[in-house]
Each structure stands twice: as structure tokens, then as C-alpha cells.
Image (spheres, rainbow, N blue to C red):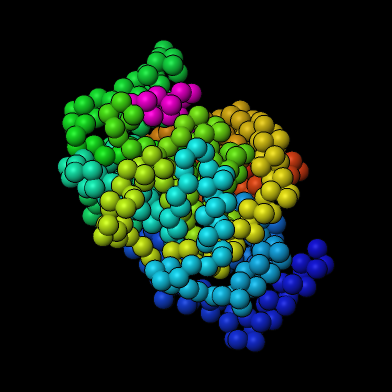
Amino acid sequence: MANREAQLKDRKGVMKAHNRSSQTIRDYDNKYYMHPWEGMDSFGQADRTISASAEGIYVYDEHGNRLIDGPGGMWCTQIGYGRRDMADAIADQVMRLSYHSPWNTASEPPAVLAKKLADLAPGGLNNVFFTTGGSTAVDTAIRYMHFYNNRLGRPNKKTVISRDKAYHGSTFLSASVTGRDRGKNFLDVDRERVHLLPDVNPLIRPEGMSLDDWCAAKVKDLEDAIVALGPDSVGAFIAEPILASGGVIIPPNGYHKGCMEVCRKYDVLYISDEVVTGFGRLGHWFASKDVFDIEPDMITCAKGLTSGYLPLGACLINDRIVDPISGPDQEGVMFNNGYTYSGHPVACAAALKNIEIMETEKILEHVREISPYFLERLHSLRDEPMVGDTRGIGLVGCVQGKVTGDGDSYALDQQFGAKVDEKCEEMGLIVRPMANMCVFSPPLIITKTQIDDMFDILREAIRQVAREFPQAA
């Protein structure tokens, strides 16, 4: 702890030397930095916590307060913060080769990483297209579907089927296939070639319906939509193995396999969005095959690929949809998609080191070993009157509040999430509130003692908030 205090003092000293007090940073942040999902009603007036440093599973704010990182940054800090070996690998690559054009030259880090990802991925997913993050990975998958069907002479086979509550990104195409909008959305999306299926959450199934029947109904949703839209017009089905930002919605057993069979039946590409579930979150490199027993046509990934140390995403494309449109007879044909930072050598070096650390320290095995305890502590919160549901798999979970009363239910839900967030932070825990839900995806290195600390704080926060919502008791 003394070492940590010394580091904080040093870092604060650097801030002071540059005349950047906490108040100055907050002022700059409010005046110049437009954040993701910025609330325009309070634009320029936010009172955000300033993250000053981090180590392991903990983030330290500008006052030196230690906070457990419950959401793992943004579902991404698999190996934890402050790894010197990561810093060294990144710095070494910066000095060796900080950038090269992916259009004109090759370099070692992206080539070796592509080979590594192909080895880790299931089956024929041997073709790796590097992107800048998850949204651009999804964008790439959809564009490749367009390209594939154009090359096969099927220019109308372009509609993408997705789900209500699904989240796939913020670029135009990835936002268009996103179905997670409980509030108002004032941004345009393309709904002409996107079809959203109803929510797959087993919690909302009709009373008395079994999980098997619910699964069959949800698979039938997909087949009915393909038939109604016309198989000649449907190009792809995109699905998260679990709907993460939608509230950690876990489809019933057999759902993904059933959907895959429907896609094969109608020659529809299956895109598995593993931006959250990839790289250990469920105890495996990829959840598609090892957890849900499917081999998709494409897998998108990001986040845990570098444990958040640098931005990087990838779209893995199956041989079965590359081989038919590649070869000597395709002279002059190009997949005209790419980014200045595709296969950035420093980001790829970070990913390679991240994977090496996960392998050497047996982090996937740790996740599989500790997940039952994480889920046990998660589900123990069901005895709180204000908790309506808990759900989770691997090291990802959700606590859903149960708030009733007069007025706008969405506003009450938001109040619940905001108040739990506030109480948790006061006691040393970062949660990610989403309306009446708190989601968790802590760093994969978390221990049993740290899991206890995390859920003890959350329980006490819920109890304190419950006193302000007597109708929930």
C-alpha cells in the first residue's frame, strides 16, 4: 500500500507540475470533451469522477480513493491494470516500428497475431481482418456480407436480422443492427435492410412456458422472419452469444445452435458478435464453439483482445465464405474496406502480449474455476426485496432492480441505477448502471476475497437505496 501511495503522490506531482489540478481537469473535461452517450441537458456541467491511476482490479480516483472496477472498464480489462510487462511490450514495439501502412507493407505483429487468432478460433475461421474496435469489426462483417453476395450475383441478399436488446456498436452499420434503445435515439439508422426480432430474454416468457418451448419459439422467430422477408433478401443474422449491454441476457440452451441450423437452411450468414464474450469472459478464447457449440461464418472481437491497453478489433472470416470468391479467377476484384490503423503494429504487439499473459498465467482456467463462486455470490442477492432478478455466466453478471410506484417506470428505474451507483462508489465499488440494472464484468484476475468485497458493497448499497424506495420493500 505504501508503494501505491508513493505512486499516487508521484503522479499527482506530475499533474501539479503541469498546473493541472483536479478542478482544472474537470473544467477541461466539461468544456472540451464530448463523452460517449453525452446527455445534452447537462452538457458541460457533469461532475464525473476522475480516474487517476489503476492497478490490478482497482481504479484510484483523484483523491486516492480505491475503487473495485466492477464492470472491468467497458467489459475489457481482462488481465487487470498496471502490467509492467504490457508496458514494456508496447514501448518496445513503439521504438521498433510504431506504424506501417497496411496497404503497402507487412510487419511481424499483425502477421503473427492473425496466425494466433486463427489458431485460437474454431474451425475454418482463418481469415483475420483487423479493425480499430468492436463497432468497426461489426461494420466490416456486414460489409463483407455485402461483398460476398455481390460477388455471387445476389445483390438483393443484404438484409441483416438482429434482436431487440442487442448491442453491436456505434458506427452507422453497427448502430443500425443494434436493438438496445430504451430511451430516445435521435441518430439516424438504416432500418430498410435491418429486421429486429423480439427479445430473447427467458425472463419475459409467458407464464407456464418451459425454457425448451421458449427456445423453440425464439428460433422460430428467426425462421419466420427469413421466410416473410424472403430468403433471397436476407444476407446475415447477427447475434451476441449473450446480450451483454442489453442486460446480460442469456438465451436458453440450444438457441444459438437452432439459429445456426436455420441460417444454414436458408443460406444466411451467421455473425457471432464476441466483442464482450471473447478472450476469457466465459472461460474460453471464444464462446461460440466452446460454450454454445456453433462455428459461425464470422466472429467479431475487440475489448479483451488487448485487455483495453490499446484499441484493436478484428473480424474473423470463415474459409467457407472466402474460398468461393478468391483465387486466380477473381483478377481485379478487391474487398475495398480498411482503416489507416488496420493491423496497427503497436496494438497488435499489445494483443500478442495480452494473449501470452493469459496463457502463461492460466487465466482462462482461473475463470472456469472461480466463476461458480462469482455466480453464487451474484445470485445470493436475490433475497434482497429490491432485487427482481440476477443472471450471469462466466465472469459476467447482472443485478436487476425491482422498483414499482407512481410515475414513469423508466424514470424510477434510472433513479434506482443512479442511486446504487452513487452508494457503491462511496463505499469503494464502480458499477455500471443501466436503468434498473447493474452489470458486472470484472477483470478476470479477480479473487474470491475480492468477489466477496464487491458483492458485500453492492448488497449494502442496495439496502441503503431501498430505504429511499419504500414501495419496493
On the image, the x and y values in percent for residue 114 come to 52, 55
Residue 182 location, quadrant: top left
Q: Nearer the viewer, residue 131 or 297?
A: 297
Q: Nearer the viewer, residue 180 or 351?
A: 351
On the image, the x and y values in percent for residue 438 come to 52, 43
Span colored in magenta: 250-262
Magenta part, dominant SS: helix
Left or right: where 175 falls relative to 128: left
Q: Most extreme residue toward the right, as rendered?
A: 2
Q: Is residue 261 magenta?
A: yes
Left or right: where 388 falls relative to 221: right
**Could one spot residue 467 in this view of the protein?**
no
Left or right: where 193 falls relative to 327: left
Residue 103 location, quadrant: bottom left
Q: Residue at x 30, y 39 (%)?
A: 236
Q: Residue at x 42, y 42 (%)?
A: 318
Q: Is residue 297 magenta?
A: no
**Could one spot residue 321 in this view of the protein?**
yes
On the image, the x and y values in percent for residue 322 come to 36, 46
Q: Residue at x 47, y 46 (%)?
A: 126
On the image, the x and y values in percent for residue 135 come to 39, 54
Q: Nearer the viewer, residue 119 or 470?
A: 119
* 448 vs 212: above or below: below
Q: Nearer the viewer, residue 445 or 448?
A: 445
Q: Residue at x 48, y 49 (%)?
A: 301
